[in-house]
């Protein structure tokens, strides 16, 4: 997830390949430890509580397919 502008008026969600350990380290330093999503139950908990997560491609396709598309919407204030 990112921001389109400094006013944080648009949420941008775009998939990208990452090195998992480096991504976990970076997320932990900036936001706190991310959730690791592997199974359907993990995805369900993520849907309920939201936050930051590292998701494998297979798990994303199976359990969070809406994240497979680029997504740009007005940010919730």
Image (tube, rainbow, N blue to C red):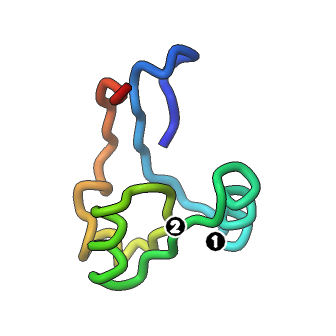
Q: Residue at x 28, y 70 (%)?
A: 61
Residue at image point 31% right, 56% down: 68
Q: Position of residue 15 (x, y in %)?
A: 44, 52
Q: Quadrant of residue 13?
A: top left
Residue 73: % across, % down? 29, 29
Tag on residue 54? 2
Task: Say left or right for 7 vs 11.
Answer: right
x and y, in percent, of residue 20 in the image: 64, 71
* Side of 41 relative to 51 (left or right): left
Which type of secondary structure does the marked residue at label 2 adopt?
strand
For the C terminus, the image quarter is top left
Residue 42 vs residue 68, the one in the foreground = 42
**In the picture shown, does residue 46 fall above or below 70?**
below
Q: Residue 14 appears in which quarter of the rendering? A: top left
* Cα distance in 3D space between marks 2 and 1: 7 Å
Question: Residue 20's mark?
Answer: 1
């Amino acid at each position: 997830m990112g921001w389109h502008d400094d006013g944080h008026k648009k949420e941008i969600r775009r998939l990208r390949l990452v090195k998992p350990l480096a991504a976990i380290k970076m997320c932990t330093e900036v936001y706190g430890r991310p959730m690791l999503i592997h199974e359907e139950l993990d995805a369900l908990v993520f849907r309920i509580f939201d936050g930051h997560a590292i998701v494998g491609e297979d798990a994303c396709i199976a359990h969070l397919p809406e994240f497979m598309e680029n997504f740009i919407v007005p940010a919730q204030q």
